Image (cartoon, rainbow, N blue to C red):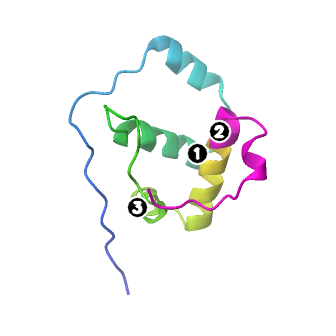
Amino acid sequence: MTTTRYVPPIPTTEVVTISREALAILALVELTQNSHRLMNTFLAYQDPETGCVGLSQVEMGSMLALSAPSVNRAVKQLADKAWPGSWSQRSTNCTPC
């Protein structure tokens, strides 16, 4: 049995601009393929006014064809890169926004 999960639309059609300097820094960060795909999804779906991404774990998994544990690992890896050491003491469960 297959179910179709709802994936919300991108909050705006406005182009997301990333500077060359930011792209150069992102190129230096070692990420798994799933974490890289998740980061690109976060960049695409961020609200231009708040910077927040209103996607649940289920929605992220549906969009990227990943299981819930894979989404959790990708979020954890991104968080470890952004805040080294601090994420390891927290739960790796990803909860809906």
Please, what is the dominant secondary structure of the magenta stretch? loop
Q: Which residue is mark 2?
A: 31
Tell me which residue sits at (33%, 38%) in the image: 47
Name the kind of residue labelled 2 in the image.
Leu
Residue 94 vertical position relative to residue 33 in the rendered view, above or below:
below
Magenta-drawn segment:
79-97
Tell me which residue sits at (67%, 45%) in the image: 77
Name the kind of residue labelled 1 in the image.
Ser
Tell me which residue sits at (28%, 56%) in the image: 8
**Front tag of 1 and 3:** 3
Disc 1 crowd rating (10 Å Cα; few below 14, some 14-19, many 20+) is many
Disc 3 crowd rating (10 Å Cα; few below 14, some 14-19, many 20+) is some
**Front tag of 2 and 3:** 3
Q: Position of residue 85 (x, y in %)?
A: 79, 39
Q: Which residue is mark 1?
A: 35
Left-right relation of 43 to 72:
left
Query: Which label was assigned to residue 11?
Result: none
Spatial CA distance of label 1 from label 3 is 15 Å
Tags 2 and 1 in contact by the CB under 8 Å rule?
yes
- Residue that protrudes farthest toward the bottom in the picture: 1
Q: Earlier in the sequence, mark 1 or mark 3?
A: 1
